[in-house]
Amino acid sequence: MADAVLEQVPVTVLTGYLGAGKTTLLNRILSENHGRKYAVVINEFGELGVDNDLVVDSDEEVFEMNNGCICCTVRGDLIRIIGGLMKRRGRFDGIIIETTGLANPAPVAQTFFVDDTVRAKTRLDAVVAVVDAKFLLPRLEDSHEAAEQIAFADVIVLNKTDLVTPDELATVEAAIRKINRFAKIHRAQRANVPIAELLDQGAFDLKRVLAEHPDFLEDDEHEHNDDVGSVSFEVETPIDPERFNAWIGGLLAERGGDLLRTKGILAYAGEDRRFAFQAVHMMADGDFIGPWKNGEAHTSRIVFIGRNLNRPQLRRGFESCRAG
Amino acid sequence: MSATVTADHILQTRGVSHDLGAFVVAAAFARGGATAAFALGDGTLHIAPRAGGRWRVVAVHDGAVLALAPDVGPGGYLSGGDDGKLRRTGETAEDIAGFGMKWVEHVASFADARTGLLACTVGRQVHLFDGAGKKLKVLDHPSSVTGVVFDAKGKRVGASHYNGASLWFVAAKTDSARKLEWKGSHTGIAISPNGDNVVTAMQENALHGWRLTDGQHMRMTGYPGKTQALGFTRSGKWLATSGAEAIVLWPFSGGGPMGRAPSELAGGDEGVICTMVACHPQHEAVAAGFSDGLVVLADIGSARILPVCGPGRGPVSALAWSADGAQLAFGTESGFAALVDFSKQ
């Protein structure tokens, strides 16, 4: 059937504070000659100077799902707009969703876990956060959202680096790393990041979970406070699937509000394929993703990005999932 | 396979079909009954004469057509598009209204002895026009409107949105909605023929209903998928719905659906979801389309199922009866469109 061969359309979520450079970046994506066509969902049309018949103006409408999960909020407007855009499928290569400056990215991401039609026809590719090198630190002081946008991001465009000194830039980068050690950071001026570094990242593809985290073993210093941070653990002994499911299920149910993103690659006992796992708050997704590479150690790894991360407790929990 | 031949028998002997090459968003018959129209994701209307002959193609919207309804007059159609336009297509196509960047997501019409009524939804608003296209009023809602419908007498217009639905009197001097409240995202709406029941589809794979006479809530749950299409049979005794592996019919005779199990028709194939339903305008029968492309006609009383079109041409995305109940139009996500004649031959 013709429909079955159509691939899922990749969706990129673009977050960032007002003035950080989101619109500049969008304009670049839309006007540069890269041979691809993107549908763009925006909130304030006036800002975007590009004439594109695939620009959709939308009011962000977040609602709570009636599934007993208080942090399960989704973007109803996106469900409608993606449904509408799918009717003209084949006329664009991807969708870019711009969120308002103060938006929490979770409802956008959760929409891709919750709605069947959206899941069937599109795939969340990555969350890209644009941050202003000069004003990020005060933003982190005065708002929750700035930290959440960074915590959620797979790719961070550290923009306006020409407006700060090298020392200031190092401080800002350290602040970003403290929140999210796992995102790719691109330094930029006027949002001049190659588009290939932003789109088609496959960051929510289970096959690529934790594929690019070179500083995995880096020890992190801060733990257990209200700031958003990230922790990671590894175990060499194979994992017992039942123990892991019980532990992670309970953890997400109880602490899902604080856990912004969770990702893991697991070596299950008696199984020669890797099991990949990811969650956005309480919404989780997991599957086998093929065999370990020849000679590769069967190391299970898990990453948490969130608030109030109790490192010793999380480590004990993960270690208790070991088989045997 | 012989089974496929059998399933396509009606289509082959009584149908006319075309591959239109784009998502069939909706189908409708003109009120006068001379033509059927298919609205496509490429912005065109394909208008098919019921008597046979060439299908006429009209480029109506710059983008996708999002909604289609018969016009109030005998020969035309009303459409909304993602180009922000509400248009009317008869011999020629003309604008009724434009809304800039906002999409016109739903349209409805009501014909009476006077000029009739037109409605369209744009974001949180329902815009009401008389049949000539003159703006009557704008009705504001707390969130985006996801469905709009006139009652059988054209006295009220209902709109679904977050946390419930709103019912408005079309002719009211001062507009205030009767608010039907239920927490959650409501994604479509139907009003029973007697005007006593309003039912919405919900994001959580369920339906919610309100009995207007006493405010009784009705919860209808158990769907594996979202209900995209819902409608009452002509008598109002049954509410036919999509979203399950069968046509799900809720009983509205007697005390209503509370505490009663729905009837299920034409089920059987695991994983194949009913995507569209359209109740017959004369009889207690319902046409249904499925995610594998199967289209059937189900007689509710006898539970007899007549296959109309076999699987394999894409998920059914549009389904409509002619007012005399003699012809059925349907279309699929992959662009297949057909007109089938059930009249005596």
Image (cartoon, rainbow, N blue to C red):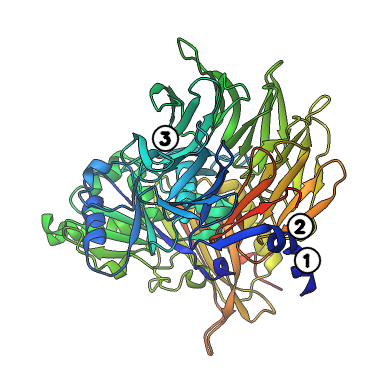
Residue A75 visible, this angle: no
Near-viewer residue (A37 or A95): A37
Say which label, 1 or 3, has the lower sequence index: 1
Q: Residue B307 shows which numbered tag? A: 2
Q: Are marks 3 and 2 in contact (CB under 8 Å)?
A: no
Residue B210 appears anywhere in the view:
yes
Q: Name the amino acid, label 3.
A: Gly
Residue A245 placement (x, y as % from top left): 66, 61
Q: Is mark 1 on a helix, strand or loop?
A: helix
- Measured Cα–Cα span from mark 2 to mark 1: 8 Å
Disc 3 marks which residue?
B123
Q: Residue B6 carries which label?
A: 1
Taking depth in this image into account, of A250 and B286 the one nearest to the observer is B286
Type of residue at label 2? Answer: Pro
Q: Classify mark 2: residues with Cα within 10 Å, few (<14), some (14-19) or many (20+).
A: many
> Seen from this angle, which residue lies furthest top?
B173
Q: Do the residues labelled 1 and 3 touch (CB within 8 Å)?
A: no
Q: How far apart are marks 1 and 3 (CA)?
A: 45 Å
Chain letter for mark 2, please: B
Q: Which residue is drawn at 60% across and 62% down?
A: B314
Camera-near label (3 vs 2) is: 2
Q: Nearer the viewer, mark 1 or mark 3?
A: 1
Numbered badge on residue A109: none
Q: Quadrant of the N terminus of chain B?
A: bottom right
Mark 2 vs 1: CB contact within 8 A: yes
Q: Residue A119: where, in percent of width, then height?
A: 54, 57
Specify whether A218 is left or right of B12: left
